[in-house]
Image: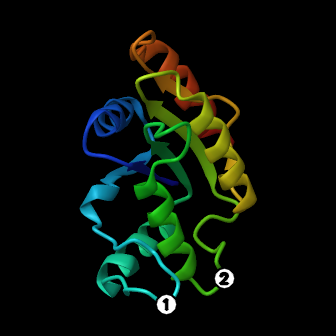
Amino acid sequence: MKILIISATNGNNHVLGEKISELLIAKHELISLEDYPLPLFVPGGEKADESLTTALVEKFEKADGFIFCSPEYNAGIPPILTNAITWITISTKNWRDAFNDKKVLIASHSGGAGHWFLSSFRDQLEYMGCIVHPRTISIHRNAEFNPESVERILTSFIKLL
């Protein structure tokens, strides 16, 4: 079993990914999407560096599950995350290949509680064939990282896998 922890940014959500990584007992890898400078996807537009998309697709396809750590941007999913998912889906034989039947835990470190992101991203992941854990991790100005709570959520997530 291998879990891929994906941080949308190198800031607070990467720190959140590191904290989750320290508590996670399963085999895992933490990546940041900022390390994969993909161009904005535009149909018929600029092509992405094939080595970047191949490396990213390979990581997603080999993972049994994902933990996404991402902020809420303008009450939604940040562009870097949407863009990466788009490049992954167009770079596989069947657009759902890297996501279908994968187990997912969603985490967020945002200014607010991130409810809009958590809800809309859950919908997107389920549409792509993922099985999304019912609990989420939400860190914000009124909720600090609670290792005991996160550990319980991770234990439940591991059981899902």
The reply to whether residue 161 is visible in this rendering is no
Q: Residue 80: horizontal and vertical position, in percent?
A: 40, 57
Mark 1 surroundings within 10 Å by alpha-carbon count, few (fewer than 14), some (14 through 19), many (20 or more): few
The amino acid beneath tag 1 is Gly
Q: Is residue 153 above or below residue 56?
A: above
Q: Are marks 1 and 2 in contact (CB under 8 Å)?
A: no
The amino acid beneath tag 2 is Asn
Q: Which residue is mark 1?
A: 44
Question: What count of labels does the image hold?
Answer: 2
The label shown at residue 94 is 2
Location of residue 38 (image quadrant): bottom left
The reply to whether residue 115 is visible in this rendering is yes
Q: Give the residue at x 53% y 31%.
A: 154
Asked which secondary structure carries label 1, the reply is loop
Mark 2 surroundings within 10 Å by alpha-carbon count, few (fewer than 14), some (14 through 19), many (20 or more): few
Location of residue 22 (image quadrant): top left
Q: Spot the residue most to the top.
A: 142
Location of residue 157 (image quadrant): top right
Q: Is residue 25 above or below residue 61?
A: above
